[in-house]
Image (cartoon, rainbow, N blue to C red):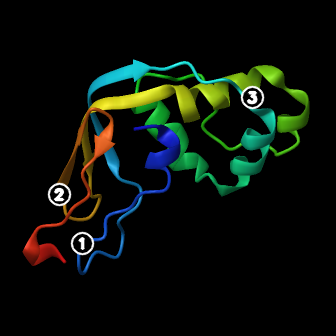
Amino acid sequence: MRLLTHNMLSSNIKGVTNGFPLRIEVEKVVEKHVEINHNFLRNIFPKIDWKAFSDASRIMGYAELPEEAPEPSVLESDLEFLRKFHHALLELHLEVGALVCPETGRKFPVNKGIPNMLLHEDEG
């Protein structure tokens, strides 16, 4: 599971009002090369919850991103930042682990890079 995916997921358990961001528990992270696309990065940047993204990248073992969201102008001028943003967003994969609801503590397993967000009968 890429951090792009993580940044879009939340817990949908009935009654949960604060289901984002899901906490990551890491068992295995893999890096998979993805061709960089500057236009995609510039377009997705405003949609990313930076604090959740930056915290998740650190949990995954990648501490190269700033804690505070940079100004959007950095996307036009700083190729090194774009490379780091690309790496964390698209090349780091949670292969095995769990996503944990911040409100209930419910763990959603991640196996082979696929998060299982299915709810139990009493959660829906």
| Rendered-image quadrant of the C terminus | bottom left
- Location of mark 2 (residue): 106
Tag 1: residue type? Ile
Is 42 located above or below residue 60 in the figure? below
Tag 3: residue type? Leu
Residue 70, visible in the rendered structure = no
Query: What is the CA distance from the residue labelled 1 to the residue labelled 3?
Result: 35 Å
Which residue corresponds to the image point at 34% horizontal and 76% vertical from the top-left?
Answer: 17
Query: What is the CA distance from the residue labelled 2 to the residue labelled 1?
Result: 9 Å
Q: Nearer the viewer, residue 71 or 45?
A: 45
78 displayed left or right of 16:
right
**Quarter of the rendering containing residue 90:** top right
Which residue corresponds to the image point at 65% horizontal and 31% vertical from the top-left?
Answer: 85
Q: Please, what secondary structure does the residue beneath circle 2 have?
A: loop
Is 29 located above or below residue 53 in the figure? above
Q: Please, what secondary structure does the residue beneath circle 3 have?
A: helix
Badge 1 or badge 3: first in the primary sequence? 1
Is 115 located above or below residue 104 in the figure? above
Residue 76 picture location, percent across and down:
90, 35
Residue 32 picture location, percent across and down:
49, 20
- Location of mark 3 (residue): 82
Q: Which mark is residue 13?
A: 1
